[in-house]
Image (spheres, helix red, strand yellow):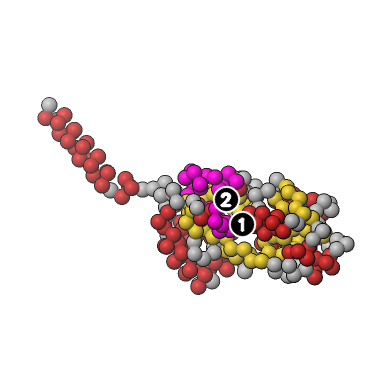
């Protein structure tokens, strides 16, 4: 009887000790979600793992420097955003918008800034018009190619009444362009160069030099996330990575 009482007391003491240790408050890994077809920022490799600049930068900043375990998951872009909105994922990295501010905390400074330039066919009959363009309305009469879900396009191009040919996949924009089914796209130089290289379209497509816009990609942490409070520390880490040149090193600049 005494032995039973002793064992019960020991078990209770051990349980009490466990609940007071740091392990009891260990959080789930920080789940980052991405558009899985957005090279070089986020994409799947041949083994179906998420790769890209976003993954490299955020792994170093959050996991290696802040000590928070990170999980990377790729989805169609609308689903990735929905998961953060519903609290099923913690964060994504994208262009800030009023809609996203409603359900996320957005970093003050961008993780990455990318210039937006025209991509078109080298033999396009209206190449001179595109080269001379300095504002979006200079491109009237041409058909833009974009993937469904592109927020910048809907915010900037669509309200101007310019023609847009939508596709389900980002790479389809460039394949259709090479076949003459759209005239141009105006997008991130990082993204367009990756797609043109991956699709072996360098002999057919060209990036024009004029920069129409520069797009900032910021970390957006869901307000429902258990990690909603880490943003100040993340911003300090990113500031250090910029000052030391580490961020440019990761991006290959």
* Res. 41 mark: 1
Which quadrant of the view contains residue 159? bottom right
The residue singled out by tag 2 in the image is: 34
Residue 130 seen anywhere in this rendered image of the structure: yes
Magenta region: 78-99
Q: Quadrant of the C terminus?
A: bottom right
As rendered, which of 215 and 12 lies closer to the eye? 215
Residue 64 seen anywhere in this rendered image of the structure: no
**Residue beneath the point at 23% across and 44% down:** 17
Say few, some or many: other residues with alpha carbon within 10 Å of mark 1 (under 14 / 14 to 19 / 20 or more). Answer: many
Q: From this view, report whether residue 148 is shown above or below residue 2.
A: below
**Residue beneath the point at 57% across and 68% down:** 248
**100 sits left or right of 194 in the view:** left
Which of marks 1 and 2 precedes in the sequence?
2
Residue 222 in the image, given as x and y percentages of width and height: 47, 51
Q: Kindly report the distance in space between the C-alpha atoms of the residues bearing marks 2 and 1.
A: 9 Å
Badge 1 element: loop
């Amino acid at each position: 009887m005494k032995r039973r009482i002793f064992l019960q007391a020991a078990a209770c003491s051990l349980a009490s000790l466990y609940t007071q240790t740091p392990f009891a408050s260990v959080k789930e890994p920080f789940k980052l979600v991405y558009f899985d077809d957005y090279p070089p920022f986020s994409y799947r490799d041949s083994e179906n793992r998420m790769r890209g600049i976003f993954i490299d930068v955020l792994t170093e900043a959050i996991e290696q420097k802040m000590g928070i375990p990170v999980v990377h998951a790729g989805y169609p872009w609308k689903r990735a955003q929905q998961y953060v909105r519903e609290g099923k994922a913690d964060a994504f990295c994208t262009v800030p918008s009023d809609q996203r501010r409603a359900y996320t905390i957005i970093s003050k400074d961008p993780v990455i800034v990318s210039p937006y330039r025209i991509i078109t066919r080298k033999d396009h009959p209206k190449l001179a018009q595109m080269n001379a363009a300095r504002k979006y309305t200079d491109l009237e009469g041409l058909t833009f190619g974009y993937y469904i879900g592109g927020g910048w396009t809907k915010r900037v191009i669509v309200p101007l009444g310019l023609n847009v040919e939508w596709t389900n996949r980002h790479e389809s924009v460039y394949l259709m362009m090479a076949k003459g089914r759209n005239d141009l796209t105006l997008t991130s130089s990082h993204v367009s160069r990756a797609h043109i290289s991956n699709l072996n379209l360098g002999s057919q497509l060209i990036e024009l030099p004029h920069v129409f816009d520069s797009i900032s990609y910021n970390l957006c942490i869901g307000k429902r996330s258990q990690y909603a409070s880490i943003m100040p520390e993340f911003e300090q880490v990113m500031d250090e990575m910029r000052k030391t040149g580490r961020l440019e090193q990761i991006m290959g600049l």
